Image (spheres, rainbow, N blue to C red):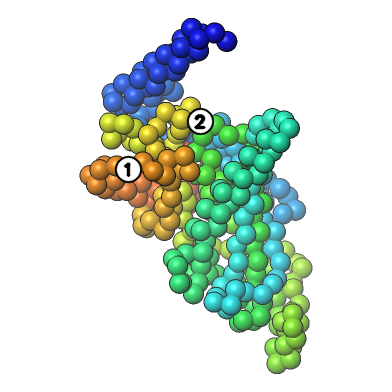
Amino acid sequence: CSWGESRAKAMAALSSVEVWEAGVARNVREDGRERTEFRRLTITEGVVDHAMGSAQVDLGDTKVLAVLTLELGPPRKERPRSAIVSVSVDCMLSSPVDGNNYKHFDAKGRDIARRVEQLYDGCSGAKLGCLDLENDLCVSEGSLVWHLNLDCAVISDDGSLLDCVAMACRCCLRDATIPGHEVLEQQEVGPSGPEVRVEEDPNLHRTLSSGRVPTYVSVGVLEQGQWVFDLSAAEELRCRSVMHFGVDPSGSIRSACTSNANTCVSHSSGTMADVVEAACLAGRALLEQVDASKAPEGERRIVHLGK
């Protein structure tokens, strides 16, 4: 296109950002939400009949399906009693893949998976992850623990994808059950650990507690120091920075990071204090609402929050 057309497009984009920022300053966004308002959140658990656990989470037009598989394996040396949570995120369904751009989606999926795994690992140096605090996931200390594999497929991405993936994993675990087991030869442990009989009858499986598991709350900060929750894809591009806080049900922050493109952006101490406090309160309120919802006996749990 000509220089004039390029300039016109740049001016239109600048005008769009300025209009959006002016709206945020008046506490109204393009879709009618207030600054701290989330889009409609829909959680459907048990969507894959034969999985150990599954959930689909729709956050506006961002949609993620998570499925859990289980296996027994060795623990980490520094955590002999702690389960291992592995996350994979496939972003290729959410955008057309052409040529070598699949590498971008692979990298994006790995980055999101790594950040979600951090929620389950807990603080640096901790002997137990957050799932171990309420669940006995150790079969034989130092030899065998449960490995929980969370495979996520991004169906569509319209912003706040990290938040949606983290919530999908959490709800997938809430839907999960752990098979009973019996250690047959605890005294004769071989290289692969003791011999274990795993209970196949699903009626004898136990529910997995996810009440201590955090989720991510992403906050977009504007030039004027104002902030917004639950950003759409267009809003993510307009923010000065996007910060992600892993918040647990008590309102404590368990993990924090920033989007790669905004790692060099700094904010005033006052702005940061306000953003952190807002994220803690929002995360606690969100998890309270999600955990308070119960499914009718014998039916899958479906949660609707927001407008």
Q: Which residue is mark 2?
A: 233
Determine the image quadrant of residue 220. top left
Image mark for residue 266: 1
Image mark for residue 257: none
Residue 57, image x, y percentages? 57, 42
Residue 169, image x, y percentages? 58, 52
Q: Give the residue type at disc 2.
A: Ala
Q: Nearer the viewer, residue 36 or 123?
A: 123
Q: Secondary structure under badge 2?
A: helix
Q: Secondary structure under badge 1?
A: loop
Determine the image quadrant of residue 181. bottom right
Reply above or below: 118 against 92. below
Q: Residue at x 52, y 44 (%)?
A: 162
Residue 175, image x, y percentages? 61, 55
Reply above or below: 297 against 137. above
Q: Quadrant of the C terminus?
A: top left
Q: Give the residue type at disc 1.
A: Ser
Determine the image quadrant of residue 77. bottom right
- Left or right placement of residue 165 versus residue 264 in this view: right
Q: CA distance from mark 1 to mark 2?
A: 22 Å
Residue 40, image x, y percentages? 49, 34
Q: Nearer the viewer, residue 59 or 176?
A: 59
Reply above or below: 240 against 56. above
Q: Earlier in the sequence, mark 1 or mark 2?
A: 2
Q: Residue at x 54, y 31 (%)?
A: 158
- Left or right placement of residue 172 versus residue 30 in this view: right
Tell me if residue 299 can be seen. no
Q: Nearer the viewer, residue 165 or 39?
A: 165
